[in-house]
Amino acid sequence: MNEFTPLRSALFVPGNRPEMIDKAINTAADTIIIDLEDAVPLDKKSEARRHARQNVKGQSKRLIIVRVNGIETDFFEADLDDVVSEDLWCLMIPKVEDPGGAQKLAKALEEQEKKKGFEQGAVKIIPVIETARGVQNISAILGDSSISYRLHTCAFGAADFTLDMGIEMTLSGAELLYPRSRIAVACRAAGLEPPLDSPYMIDIKDVGGLESDALRAKQLGFQGKLCVHPLQVEVCNRVFTPTPEEINYAEKVIRAFEVTKTKGLGTLQLEGKFIDKPIVEKARRIMRIASLTGQKPDESKS
Ligand code: GLV
Ligand code: MG
């Protein structure tokens, strides 16, 4: 996957539950994440690896990520041994906390690639930042040259972050403002595509709560959310897709600016709003995401 593909929804599924993997593959999630980590009981790790490997194999139709166990765990090496293959697009690495961890990870991946005869850097990664140390060290982690060339983006995990901090996840999400902002800014500063936000875990069936949470994450600069239930996919896809109104307004801005430019001017007013270069660039970005998510301008509204 070379071109930026927006990941509005990334649906977790426990690796040891093949029936759930099949279901997840058939949802509208932009990607699915087969989990070998926290959703899998300790005695089911090798079973989960087997299902992950089988599902990744020959998988060209569905974008699949595998979340392995943490770098410092006893499961990590065996996870890589079992799931790294030429069909694997991307690994999600939990609890990355410092450049030391990033370097260990890099070494392990290089060994895998060498052993299996792949080109170096073939395996992409998404580190999950979900501890206080991870948040504190994020720029050093993303900027570490041992892994920077493999990064697809990074992700935030609020369950582990709030565990580490000894705080509760609340409906307002106020306690997550700092780590989310820090992660979104660091990701951008590292030249990566926007990060993926934590799953909404407070109440799986609370669609309104999820929508508010997703909108907050979007406002802070996330491209999408991790999901822990198929019910969450549709909301995330909707929130992180430009609306027809946004698309039509963006088109109007771009058109009006082209006319302004022919008159030798660099600014204009449109529907009471001041438009200059950054606003036009934002409109272009909306059009780019709209096109990548298959949205078309609504002709009736232009
Ligand atoms: C996800 O891994 C989280 O900890 O929220
Ligand atoms: Mg976690």
Image (cartoon, rainbow, N blue to C red):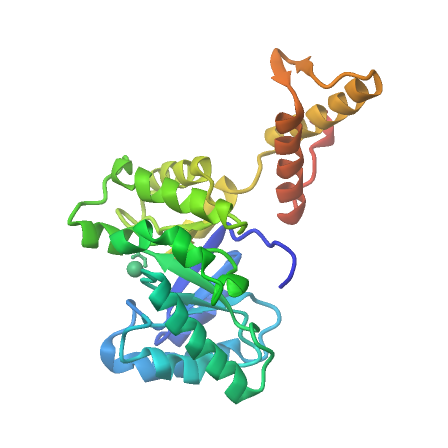
**The quarter of the displayed image where residue 281 is located:** top right
Residue 6, visible in the rendered structure: yes
Where residue 3 sits in the image (x, y, percent)?
65, 57
Q: Identify which residue, 163 or 235, lies in the foreground.
A: 163
The number of numbered discs placed on residues in the rendered structure image is: 0
Q: Quadrant of ligand 1?
A: bottom left
Extreme top residue here? Answer: 272
For image coordinates 27% across by 55% down, the residue present is 133
Relative to 144, say whether 77 is above or below: below
Q: Position of residue 150 (x, y in %)?
A: 52, 65
What residue lies at 43% left-to-right and 84% top-to-bottom?
A: 82
Q: How far across and how far down the image is residue 156, in percent?
A: 36, 52
Q: Can residue 223 be seen from the camera position used here? A: no
State left or right for residue 81 relative to residue 89: left
What residue lies at 33% left-to-right and 72% top-to-bottom?
Answer: 71
Q: Is residue 58 above or below residue 190?
A: below
Could you tell whether 57 is left or right of 258 in the image? Answer: left
Q: Nearer the viewer, residue 222 or 178?
A: 178
Q: Position of residue 212 (x, y in %)?
A: 37, 36
Question: Residue at image x 65%, y 19%?
Answer: 275
- Decide if residue 114 is on the left or right side of residue 126: right
Q: Nearer the viewer, residue 266 or 210?
A: 266
* In the image, farthest residue toward the right: 262
- The answer to which image quadrant residue 269 occupies is top right
